[in-house]
Image (cartoon, rainbow, N blue to C red):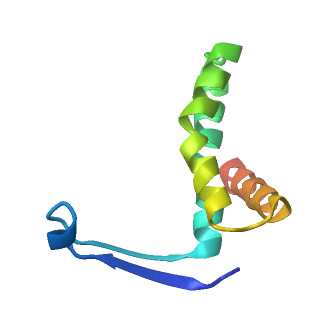
Amino acid sequence: MGEAVLTIRPGALADGYTNVVWGEIHTQLVNLPGGELAQVRCLREQGLWTPMHGRATRNAAAHDRTAMRSLGFDWRTRHAAAQEAETHLARH
């Protein structure tokens, strides 16, 4: 991990906007589960978490899990990245 990636998608080929993304694969792998973790934390802190909210949060994050798998890393690496995301979330 740690390979830097530069992606430029000219707007003329897509939607009229040129998208430039400079990121590191490891950062992407850690950030993907972050949204789901933050939603669950917020719901729990506000006393709003229910099993139904948990299922809705998991369903909403399905595309993030698919994106993690598509990066080609094994389960252990993805799990370690999710744990790192939890560590970052715990700091705030």
Q: Quadrant of residue 53?
A: top right
Q: Residue at the location (85% across, 61% down)?
A: 76
Q: Is residue 78 above or below residue 25?
A: above
Q: Is residue 41 above or below residue 30?
A: above
Residue 13 position in % (x across, y down): 20, 70
Q: Quadrant of residue 2?
A: bottom right
Along the viewing direction, whichever of 71 and 38 lies nearer the viewer = 71
Q: Is residue 58 above or below residue 11?
A: above
**Is residue 1 rendered to the left or right of residue 42?**
right
Residue 78 position in % (x across, y down): 75, 59
Along the viewing direction, whichever of 31 and 63 lies nearer the viewer = 63
Along the viewing direction, whichever of 78 and 84 lies nearer the viewer = 78
Q: Is residue 69 visible?
A: yes
**Is residue 90 rendered to the left or right of residue 56?**
right
How many numbered dots are placed on residues in this image? 0
Q: Residue at the location (60% across, 74% down)?
A: 25
Q: Is residue 42 visible?
A: no
Along the viewing direction, whichever of 23 and 63 lies nearer the viewer = 63
Q: Residue at the location (64% across, 58% down)?
A: 68
Q: Residue at the location (55% across, 45% down)?
A: 63
In the displayed orientation, state which residue is furthest to the front.
13
Residue 69 position in % (x across, y down): 67, 58
**Is residue 86 rendered to the left or right of residue 6?**
right
